[in-house]
Image: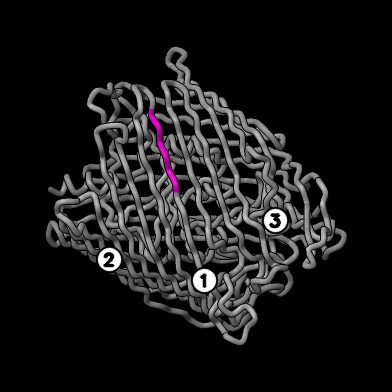
Amino acid sequence: MLKRLYIFTLLCGATFYAGAQALEDTLELREISVTAYRRPPEIIAPQRLTGEQLERLNSNSVADALRYFSGVQVKDYGGVGGIKTVNIRSMGTNHTGVVYDGIELGNAQNGQIDLGQFSLDNIEEISLYNGQKSQILQPAKDFGSAGSIYLRTRTPRFAPGETYHARGMIRTGSFDLINPSALVELRLSESVNASLSAEWLNSSGKYKFRYRRVNPAGELAYDTTAVRQNGDINATRLEFGLNGTLHGGEWHFKAYNYNSERGVPGAIVNNVWRRGERIWDTNSFAQANYSQSFGRFTTLNNAKYAFYRTHYVNNDDKQVKIDNLYRQREIYLSSANEYKITRQWHVALSYDFQWNDLQADMYDFSRPTRFTQMLSLATAYNRPRFKVQGSVLATFIHDELEGKESPGNRHNFTPAVTMSVVPLSCARELSMRVFYKRSFRMPTFNDLYYADMGNSRLEPEIATQYNLGLVYDRRFDGLISALNINVDGYYNRVTNKIVAYPKGQQFRWTMLNLGKVDIRGVDVSAAATLNPARELYVTLRGQYTYQRAIDITNPADNYYRDQIPYIPHHSGSAIANVQWRQWGLNYSFIYVGSRYNQQENIRYNYTQPWYTSDVSISRDFAVGAANLRALLEVNNLLSQDYDVILNYPMPKRNFRITLRIEI
């Protein structure tokens, strides 16, 4: 019975790639190799993109792919090297945890994880969870975020007799793009394998854009075409992995290094087209995790050391000259342990310790150090038609400042409850899900202590989430072989919400508490797999989000009950993929409705809606033992002029060509 429940849970969560998942009895399926990877059962299945789906999305980075998830807003400052951050259900980037191969990425300096730095070339799966991942065996830190993005890199899989895999890829296109990458996978023994992935990205970042602005009276102020400057990037990524299996367990080790030099494309304001800002980034970490089961007891242990170096320079003649170097370090240790009291009832206890410090070559810099301890207790009860999980997380934070009085200790307790019910025994393809969660977000070092912008009086954010949803998931024999529909209504309330606005330079921010924000929304997503003819498969995906996120801090404010900045009421996306023999055709559409770029919802702050259409066509070849793929992509097919962030124009129509060879 447990095996059947496990298979059913996987089916409810997956969005199927048509060619690999069609269920027609008359189809001839290729032989596959089953690997050791096993997805734990989940009460609430996430939004998920995997393998072939990611390859066909015309996406350069993880941030680009996340646009196709409901309830997500991506802040994109333009171009290949522009900073890209993600906001889930209007609660802010800092409420979003980003987990890379089981361990959360950190940035104690500003809390911003630039997802533009993570390539899709080595990503096997992207999953997005609202609330938290619905399993109890996980690090305590994973219980702390209001929403989480899980990135899983490619794990070597070898068929009997195979000892190595190799893959090479070259991508070129608009903006003088050169983007080669390589991957080598080795089977070292029956239980140990290794992988090495490398990538180089170089682009001038120059693209034409139209700059058109109308003043509050409706008169045309600017209307010209220019070339985007200072958007160049030169970056390398190197990633090494070592994986092993044990009797009843597994272990993984990963070393990661990312280096980049890039210009920071500034805002186009007052007819100024060029900025003098540049950033050099070095992000490195080494992490290891080990998990094993001993009868009813299972343990999961993680360790990580990270070092981040950022060199920021502003040589703009019209601004204050800046040349600052920042260094931050992180040590993270975690132990999560689960015990099965009965087959249906499990309990888990997790403890995390994290140490962060930040150094900078600035006068009178506080040089903060933060000690964070997290302790979580969770339980789960599973029946065929009813599943429930509950957890509570205790967070204790202590900051120390060099040569200054310690700001004191902070602590909070955040509970969560998640439940899934199949209401009708005669219709098991229909299920209902509900969760309640409270989360605690401590201000970052920059929020509190940065000399030019820090606000030591900032209060921590408290977010409370409620969610009620329905899932319909069914398999058919006929034209439609799979259908999945998800509808979720949610209510979020954020107290002491911290908002960051660009302050002249993109790297610098102004921090403030909005006070209270009321967020109500509906997410709708659907996916269908069709098989209209032999060897012809069609996959359709669509999602729509409605959000009302308003400031309810003070009735005396001019912006009381106004929509908060950059949150549209309506947004959505659609994907259509067609596979016929070795040919593939993909069409992607994204729509973001009108929004406001400041707190007051007045005409002067209105930002127009935008939409884009992307198309790609691919062809697979086999030459001896090598498999080749050629891919042509056309992005922003209709050459729309649009800004995701006001005064940061996005590229018009652009192209990419990719050639991949795999052995």
Q: Which residue is mark 3?
A: 311
Q: What whole-number distance in Å separates the C-alpha atoms at marks 3 and 2?
A: 40 Å
Magenta span includes 539? yes
User: Does the CB distance between marks 3 and 1 fall below 8 Å?
Assistant: no
Q: What whole-number distance in Å separates the C-alpha atoms at marks 3 and 1?
A: 22 Å
Q: What range of the chain is rendered magenta? A: 537-542
Pointer 3 or 1: first along the chain: 3
Residue 382 pos. (x, y %)? 18, 59
Q: Label for residue 540?
A: none
Amino acid type, callout 1: Arg
Q: Can residue 304 be spotted in the picture?
A: no
**Main SS of residues in magenta:** strand
Residue 640 pos. (x, y %)? 67, 45
Pointer 3 or 2: first along the chain: 3
Q: Which residue is mark 2?
A: 349
Mark 2 residue crowding within 10 angstroms, few (<14) / some (14–19) / many (20+): many
Residue 542 pos. (x, y %)? 44, 46
| Quadrant position of the C terminus in the picture | top left
